């Protein structure tokens, strides 16, 4: 008898999000599908402005409405559709099970409160939402434990410090500690090293990777840095203009990129031996209030033909490996 397949920790299906503005309605997400399994590290990559952070904010329930609006789809966390939960249930889910590391430590911490006060507020709010009453002393013990876990020297000193007294790397470690305080199941990291120098960024990413593996967390890593995603993820989703255009095992996508956009992204990566020169991708992301018909990448694609502008392609199976490899391109349609 075959063992049942475990349900994914996160399962997003057909997610559509739009924004209403002065120029009309911007249809940003056009049916995003993605999953994150238990203990899995999944990457979401694409150019700036392609919808990665909007996807993350929709999952976390922190889109500002208005102007944002979820027009359809499902966001299932351990089988429960998050979009149908009441506010209290959703707040508790965000406070305990889903957690996030924001990309800019300089703007994610309040400069007028001490680090310990801010972490205590986060932990205390989640406890109250869950109907628990923990003492400040108990919370302080947990906070110092997590500050030590993220390799901050002298956690007690950091606890009493203001954000301005810490370096950028230390502030990013504080944000990671904040995300881990309530022992989440799924960690969403949105460009966690963007505002840091490359050495500190490498330290932060190594720390994140070690924590995820040590605690058995699932992670959704959002990045435009292909090198980071290649090193830190098991599976990969490539997003363009609000849609996933390719997905598969990270090693398979890098070894055999099938969608023209994925191929173009990889050509943009400079080679250390100087054999390739960064050229960029011709054109720009479309205007979301007046997006092109069919495949949104076709105005920039060197392989585009008439059908590409007429109908949006489905995701075709393109690999034979144990992990599904799919590409949403008419070139992959079975003949």
Image (cartoon, rainbow, N blue to C red):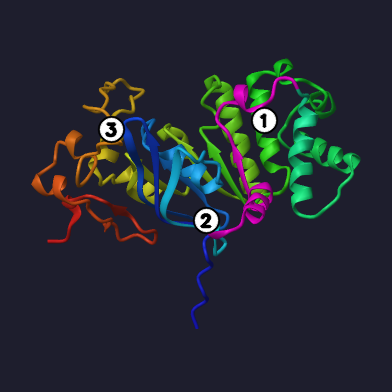
Density class for disc 3 (Cα within 10 Å; few <14, some 14-19, many ≥20) is few
Q: Can you tell which mark lies on residue 173? A: 1
Task: Report, in whole angstroms, how far the alpha carbon at label 2 lies from the one at label 1.
Answer: 31 Å
Q: Which residue is mark 3?
A: 287
Q: Position of residue 7 (x, y in %)?
A: 52, 65
Tell me the SS state at disc 2.
helix
Q: Which residue is mark 2?
A: 83
Q: Residue at x 25, y 36 (%)?
A: 290
In the image, farthest residue toward the front: 22
Magenta stretch: includes residue 15: no
Q: Which numbered disc flags the more N-terminal residue, 3 or 1?
A: 1
Q: Nearer the viewer, residue 268 or 24?
A: 24
Q: Is residue 229 visible?
A: no
Density class for disc 1 (Cα within 10 Å; few <14, some 14-19, many ≥20) is many
Q: Quadrant of residue 322?
A: bottom left
Looking at the rendered image, the quarter that the C terminus falls into is bottom left
Q: Position of residue 256 (x, y in %)?
A: 29, 46
Q: Residue at x 72, y 32 (%)?
A: 151
Query: What are the residue bounds of the magenta stretch?
Result: 83-112
In the image, farthest residue toward the left: 306
Q: Quadrant of residue 103?
A: top right
Whether residue 3 is situated above or below residue 286 in the rendered picture: below
Pointers 3 and 1 in contact (C-beta within 8 Å): no
Whether residue 327 is situated above or below residue 291 in the rendered picture: below
Density class for disc 2 (Cα within 10 Å; few <14, some 14-19, many ≥20) is some
Pointers 2 and 1 in contact (C-beta within 8 Å): no
Q: Which numbered disc flags the more N-terminal residue, 2 or 3?
A: 2
Tell me the SS state at disc 3.
loop
Magenta stretch: includes residue 108: yes
In the image, farthest residue toward the top: 165
């Amino acid at each position: 008898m075959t063992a049942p397949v475990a349900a994914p920790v996160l399962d997003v299906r057909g997610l559509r999000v739009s924004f209403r503005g002065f120029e009309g309605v911007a249809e940003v997400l056009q049916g995003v599908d993605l999953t994150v399994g238990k203990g899995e590290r999944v990457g979401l990559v694409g150019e700036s402005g392609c919808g990665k952070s909007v996807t993350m904010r929709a999952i976390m329930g922190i889109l500002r409405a208005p102007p944002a609006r979820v027009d359809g789809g499902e966001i299932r966390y351990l089988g429960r559709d998050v979009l149908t939960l009441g506010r209290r249930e959703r707040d508790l889910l965000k406070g305990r099970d889903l957690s996030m590391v924001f990309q800019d430590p300089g703007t994610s911490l309040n400069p007028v409160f001490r680090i310990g006060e801010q972490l205590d507020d986060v932990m205390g709010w989640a406890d109250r939402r869950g109907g628990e009453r923990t003492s400040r002393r108990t919370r302080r013990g947990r906070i110092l434990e997590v500050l030590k876990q993220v390799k901050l020297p002298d956690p007690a000193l950091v606890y009493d410090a203001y954000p301005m007294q810490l370096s950028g790397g230390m502030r990013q470690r504080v944000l990671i500690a904040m995300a881990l305080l309530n022992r989440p199941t799924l960690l969403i990291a949105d460009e966690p090293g963007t505002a840091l120098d490359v050495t500190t960024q490498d330290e932060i990413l190594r720390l994140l990777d070690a924590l995820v593996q040590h605690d058995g967390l699932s992670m959704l890593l959002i990045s435009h840095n292909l090198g980071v995603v290649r090193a830190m993820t098991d599976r990969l989703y490539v997003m363009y203009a609000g849609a996933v255009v390719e997905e598969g095992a990270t090693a398979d996508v890098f070894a055999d990129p099938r969608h023209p956009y994925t191929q173009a992204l990889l050509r943009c990566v400079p080679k250390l031996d100087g054999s390739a020169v960064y050229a960029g991708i011709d054109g720009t992301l479309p205007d979301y209030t007046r997006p092109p018909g069919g495949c949104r990448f076709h105005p920039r694609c060197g392989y585009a033909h008439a059908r590409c502008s007429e109908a949006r392609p489905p995701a075709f199976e393109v690999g034979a490996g144990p992990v599904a490899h799919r590409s949403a391109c008419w070139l992959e349609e079975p003949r």
